[in-house]
Each structure stands twice: as C-alpha cells, then as structure tokens.
C-alpha cells in the first residue's frame, strides 16, 4: 500500500460510532463512513438508501447501536459488517460499499473509483436539516 491510499490508523476509527472521511471521484467529493470491526474496518457511502440526501454521519459520528448503524431520520437499521438494512423503510437494501483494506494497523483505500481527500465532511456540504433547498435566482 502507498501513502496516497492511506486514510487513517485503525485505532483512530471509533469502536462505538463512525469516522467520516471525504474521497474524490474525479472532481466530485463523496463522503464515506469508516466502521471498525475489531481489527478490521469497512467503509460505506454516507447516505441512507431510503433517501439518498440523508446522511448517516452528520460530522460527529453516526448513531451506532449493538454493532448496527442507525439512520436517525426514519430509524432504518443497517448491519455494520454487511451494510444490509435489517429494519426500516429500506429493509433489504444495502449501503453502498467502498473498498478499504487494513495492513499493519493502518486503513488504506483500495477502491479504484476514488482517491482519499481528507478526514471530515466534504467542503460543499449543506448543513441544513431539511430536504428543500432555497437557492434563489
């Protein structure tokens, strides 16, 4: 693994929440949540498949209960290891996976569709809580 694909040390990924990172897909920024599973880490795109504009992690860690991610908008529950929705309006749907690998206690991006940009939310993120935007003319 090389420095360009390095994201973070495994120990920096919380065991009871998520770590929000931003990746690049061409010119677009994409948010991803890292989820720790003992000494392993999985990564999911940071949105609920029920409403793709609803973020699981709004910047301070996603709701996490009994090794499951919770969408706080409608209570959808996702298995942290598989990304499958086990309860809620999108039951049976899956979170979109992003390929990462752990080597020597470090997390690396292995998904060729993305490049690591930074830890934290994307820069153009809308912090409003509503689904309707008011852009004006």
Image (tube, helix red, strand yellow):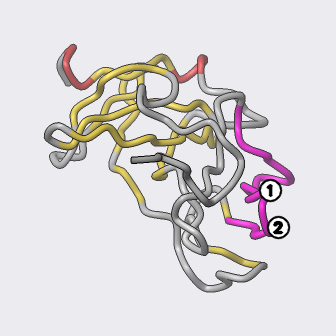
Q: CA distance from mark 2 to mark 1?
A: 5 Å
Q: Give the SS element for disc 1.
A: loop
Return the x and y of residue 119 as percentages of the image width and height. 46, 20
> In the picture, residue 31 is in which quadrant?
top left
> Is residue 1 found left or right of 40 in the rendered image?
left
Q: Give the SS element for disc 2.
A: loop
Is residue 27 placed above or below 69 in the rendered structure? Answer: above
What residue sits 80% from the left and 56% below the top?
72
> In the picture, residue 77 is in which quadrant?
bottom right
Return the x and y of residue 98 as percentages of the image width and height. 36, 51
> Is residue 62 found left or right of 53 in the rendered image?
right
Return the x and y of residue 8 as percentages of the image width and height. 44, 19
- Mark 1 burial class by Cα count in 10 Å: few <14, some 14-19, many 20+: some
Is residue 103 placed above or below 47 in the rendered structure? Answer: above
What residue sits 32% from the left and 37% below the top?
29
Is residue 84 placed above or below 79 in the rendered structure? Answer: below
What residue sits 78% from the left and 36% below the top?
16
Q: Are marks 2 and 1 in contact (CB under 8 Å)?
A: yes
> Of residues 31 and 65, which is closer to you in this image?
31
In which quadrant of the rendered image does the N terminus lie?
Answer: top left
> Is residue 47 found left or right of 67 in the rendered image?
left
Part of the protein shown in magenta: 61-78
> Is residue 61 found left or right of 51 in the rendered image?
right
Is residue 54 placed above or below 105 in the rendered structure? Answer: below
Return the x and y of residue 63 as percentages of the image width and height. 79, 46
The residue singled out by tag 1 in the image is 72
The residue singled out by tag 2 in the image is 75
Q: Is residue 69 magenta?
A: yes
Q: Is residue 10 magenta?
A: no
> Of residues 14 and 104, which is closer to you in this image?
14
- Mark 2 burial class by Cα count in 10 Å: few <14, some 14-19, many 20+: few
> Of residues 52 and 128, which is closer to you in this image?
128
């Amino acid at each position: 693994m090389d420095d360009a694909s390095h994201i973070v040390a495994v120990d920096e990924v919380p065991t009871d929440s998520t770590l929000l990172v931003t990746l690049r897909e061409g010119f677009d920024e994409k948010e991803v949540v890292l989820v720790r599973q003992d000494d392993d880490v999985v990564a999911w795109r940071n949105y609920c498949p029920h409403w793709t504009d609803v973020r699981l992690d709004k910047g301070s860690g996603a709701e996490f209960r009994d090794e499951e991610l919770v969408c706080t908008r409608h209570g959808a529950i996702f298995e942290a290891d598989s990304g499958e929705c086990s309860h809620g309006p999108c039951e049976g749907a899956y979170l979109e996976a992003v390929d990462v690998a752990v080597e020597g206690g470090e997390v690396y991006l292995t998904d060729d569709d993305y490049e690591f940009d930074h830890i934290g939310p994307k820069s153009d993120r809308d912090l409003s809580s509503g689904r309707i935007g008011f852009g004006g003319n």
